[in-house]
Amino acid sequence: MFPADLKYTKDHEWLKPAGDGTALVGITQYAQEALGDVVFVDLPEAGTSFAEGEEFGTVESVKTVSELNMPAAGEILEVNASLGDHPEAVNEDPYGKGWMVKVKLASDLAGLLDATAYAALVSAESH
């Protein structure tokens, strides 16, 4: 259910390391299901830096607005501009077309969960 090549936060963001010091960031399948239909994604400009855990944007759904927190410290290299016109990609393909930002990592990933640990967290939250 949760891709094994990703790292996860307790706040339901994922991070996909590229192996070159960069990573893609988005929200998990669990998070998008909890939000419902995503209608707007507010993301920062490229060149902005964030600390681990710092809010870097918001996702607005028909139900609520939810903060996006940076899984690891880094600088935004690229923003998924297609989400401006197609925010529903977050619902349709949260680990693919629904990615949000590409970051140049400035910290290690030691504090993030692997897929097994994240699945256990989600299982505990949904009971």
Image (spheres, rainbow, N blue to C red):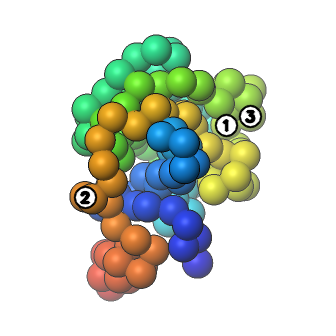
Nearest to N terminus: mark 2 or mark 3: 3
Pointer 1 with pointer 3, Cβ within 8 A: yes
Pointer 2 with pointer 3, Cβ within 8 A: no
Choose mark 1 or mark 2, whichever is in front: 2
Extreme-front residue of the structure: 20
Q: Disc 1 versus disc 3: distance between alpha carbons?
A: 4 Å
**Helix, strand or loop under label 2:** loop
Q: Where does residue 58 sit, x and y in percent of width and height? A: 43, 33
Q: What residue type is labelled 1?
A: Pro
> To which quarter of the image does residue 120 belong?
bottom left
**Helix, strand or loop under label 3:** loop
Q: Which amino acid does label 2 sit on?
A: Gly
72 up-or-down from 91: above or below: above
Circle on res. 111: 2
Neighbor class of circle 2 (other Cα within 10 Å; few <14, some 14-19, many 20+) is: some
Pointer 1 with pointer 2, Cβ within 8 A: no
Q: Where does residue 108 sit, x and y in percent of width and height? A: 30, 49
Circle on res. 86: 3
Nearest to N terminus: mark 1 or mark 2: 1
Q: Where does residue 123 sit, x and y in percent of width and height? A: 38, 82
5 lies left or right of 12 = right
Q: Quadrant of the C terminus?
A: bottom left
Q: Quadrant of the N terminus?
A: bottom right
Circle on res. 117: none
Towards the viewer: 17 or 91:
17
Neighbor class of circle 1 (other Cα within 10 Å; few <14, some 14-19, many 20+) is: many
Residue position marked by numbered label 1 in the rendering: 87
